[in-house]
Image (cartoon, rainbow, N blue to C red):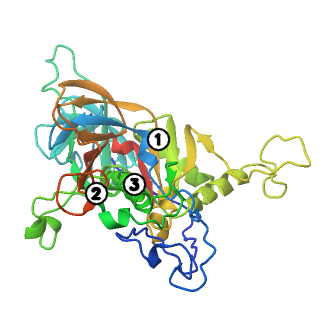
Amino acid sequence: MAQTIAFGASGNASATISGATSLTPAPDKILANENYLSNANYTFAQQYLPDLYEKEFERYGNRSIASFLRMVSAELPTTSDLIKWSEQGRLHVQSAGSITDRDTIAATAHNFRTGQTIVVTGTAGEEAKCYITDASAANSIEVATYATLSLIDSVALNDGLGPFDATDTVKIFVYGSEFKKGTSGMEGSLEADFESKENNPIIIKDKYEVSGSEMAHVGWVEVTTENGASGYLWYLKSEHETRLRFEDYLEMSMIEGEPAINVSGGIVSSAATAGMMGTKGMFFEIEENGNTTSGVITDRDDLEAFAKVLDKEGAIQENVLFVNRATGFDIDRVLAAQNSSGASTASYGLFDNDEDMALNLGFSGFRIGYDFYKSDWKYLNDATTRGGSDSLIDGVLVPAGTTTVYDQVLGQNAKRPFLHVRYRQSAMEDRKYKSWVVGSAGGAATTDKDNMEVHFLSERALCVMGANNFMLLK
C-alpha cells in the first residue's frame, strides 16, 4: 500500500541564476561568427586580428547528468514489445471495512473464511478480537466477539457505548483460527496473492549533421569533452556533444517517462502521434505504486518516518537517498542537531584539534532502524533540467540490492535489481545503443548529399521492481 509522509515544516529555498547565460546546448550546423566563444564574437574581417585563445574554457564543468541509473541499475536484453513480470503480494490476510451492525462488518471483496479469528481496530484506538461465524457473503462477514457482547455493546455497560459505533471505519487482519472438537476442516483455500506488472520500451533518437564544406573549414578551436576526448575539429566537438546529450536523454527518458492515455487531447488521440504509447518511468511508478513525502525535513521525527514506512513495506536494510542540494542540507542540519553540543560547538565527531583541521559540516548517511546513505543527484541540481525549474521533486529513496520476481518469459523466478533497464536485442539486431553515419563527407559514401549525418537510436524501458520500497521526496 502506498504511503505519504508529511514532514514537519513547509517551505522552499530558491536560487537565482544571473547574467546572460546560454543554458541549453545548441550546436549549429555551420561554422559562423556566432559559433565562437567571445562575448564580442571573433571576426577576421577587420584590420586587427583578436588575440585568440585556442582552447575552449569549460565554464560549466561536467555538463552531463547521466550517472544515476549506472549507479543503481543493470541492463538486460529483451526481444518483445511488452515486458511483463509478477511481484509477490502480501502473505497475511487483511482488509478495510466498516461496522454495519452489532455482528456484521462490511468488507468489499474480502478473502476471509469461516472459522478464522481476527483483530478489528478502529481509527480512535478501538479494538476487538472476533471469530468469523460466516464469511460466505462477497462483501461482508458475520462475527462473534470474544471479550464483549458484540462489536457495539461492551460487557461492562451493554448500553451502546462499547468498543465501536455503527458505521465506524475499521481495519481487519487474521491472526489464526479456532474449531470445535470433531468438526470438519477449513472451508476453501487461499491462492498465492501476486500482482502482474508490465512496461513497454520506447524508441529514442537523435542526429548530428554537418556539411562537407564546413568539415573542410580551417578555423578550429581546441576542445575537450566530458568523456575526455579532445581535438581541434569543431564539427567533432558538436558531434561529441550530441552523443553526450543523447546518452543523457536515455537516462532522463527512463526517469521521467509516462504512459499515454487515450483521451481527447492526449498524445494517442492525435493522428500524427497515433501508436505512441509512452513508457512508465521511475517517477511515475513511484507515484502510482510507491510512497511519497511532502514538506521539508526539519527534525529527527521526519527521518524516523522513513524507517516507519520501510517497516510496513519490504524492510530493505540498506537504502540510498538521492537528493537535491537543499534537501541534502536539510538532512545535514537535522543530523548535526542530534549531537549534544552541535548547536554551539559543532563537535560532530572525534577530532584531534589540529590547527589546520577543516570542519566537515556534511554527513554521508545515517542509521535509524535502517541504513540510509545520502548522495547529491546532479539531475535535480542542474540548471538545464530539474534544478532550473520549479520542480516538485526533491529526491528519491532507492533500495539497494536485488529482488526475486517471476519472469514470465523465462518461466522461472529470477533475481533482478530493483531498478534495471531492458533494451531490445535479437540475434540480428542490437538496439541497446546504435550509431551510424550516412552522407558523402567524413568518410561516408552512402548518398549523394554533400554532408555527414551521425544518427543515434536506442529502444528501451525501465523496470521498477517492488515500487512499494521506493519513496519520492516532494
Disc 2 versus disc 1: nearer the observer: 2
Type of residue at label 2?
A: Ala
Quadrant for the C terminus in the image: bottom left
Relative to 124, does residue 16 appear above or below in the rendering?
Answer: below
Residue 207 image-quadrant placement: bottom left
The residue at which mark 2 appears reads as 441
Residue 298 drawn at (x, y percent): 61, 60
The residue at which mark 3 appears reads as 248
Left or right: where 184 falls relative to 383: left
Work out which residue is located at the far bottom of the displayed protein and give it.
47
Q: Tag 3's secondary structure?
A: helix
Few, some or many residues within 10 Å of mark 1 (<14, 14–19, 20+):
few
Q: Which residue is at 15% across, 73% downward?
A: 265
In front of the other: 384 or 135: 384
Disc 3 versus disc 1: nearer the observer: 3
Residue 172 drawn at (x, y percent): 30, 42
In front of the other: 139 or 198: 198
In front of the other: 201 or 370: 201
Work out which residue is located at the far left of the displayed protein and give it.
271
Q: Tag 1's secondary structure?
A: helix
Residue 37 drawn at (x, y percent): 53, 72
Q: Which residue is at 68% across, 57% downward?
A: 333
